[in-house]
Image (cartoon, helix red, strand yellow):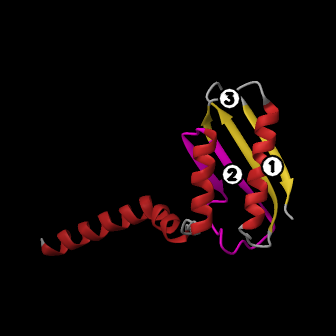
Amino acid sequence: MKKYLIIGIIAVLCLIIYRYGFLIVFWLTTPKEGTLSSSEKVLLEKIKIENHAKEVLREPKYNVDQPKDTTVYKIIVNKVPCTSDTLFYRSNAFSIKRRLDSIRLHQNYYKYQIFYECMDGKEYVYSFMKK
């Protein structure tokens, strides 16, 4: 009887590992989220206040400190109360670009993209080459 109990427990464990093993591998291989530097935190908070945004995000989410390949640094300004004045958003995006140049991000970031996602569904994207 004891033998069947041990075999049953082993069979259940094998079934669980077979069924959910990919989750364990995924959890072990997912990189940690990059931490924001203090200058990035200040910048994102200023952007949020100036644009009356609900949320400001940055991408890439992973490997921010040491990107392995050249990539684009993105600022996403969510839920902005938009107007028809796109010149305002263009000049605001350019001021964000100047601030990003001043905080000296990693050299593998070659381009900045600033996304404005409005409450009414419109999206504005502005791209700038890094200095």
Q: Secondary structure at mark 3?
A: loop
Q: Quadrant of the N terminus?
A: bottom left
For image coordinates 75% across by 66% down, the residue present is: 102
Name the amino acid type tagged 3.
Cys
Which mark is first along the chain, 3 or 2?
A: 2
Which mark is first along the chain, 3 or 1?
A: 3
Q: Position of residue 74 (x, y in %)?
A: 72, 54
For image coordinates 63% across by 57% down, the residue present is: 43
Front-lying residue, 13 or 54: 54
For image coordinates 65% across by 73% down, the residue present is: 65
| Residue 104 in sight from this viewpoint | yes
Q: Quadrant of residue 34?
A: bottom right
For image coordinates 37% across by 67% down, the residue present is: 14
**Residue topped by disc 3:** 82
Name the amino acid type tagged 1.
Phe
Q: Position of residue 94 (x, y in %)?
A: 80, 49
**Residue topped by disc 2:** 75
**Residue 56 in magenta?**
yes
Q: Secondary structure at mark 1?
A: helix
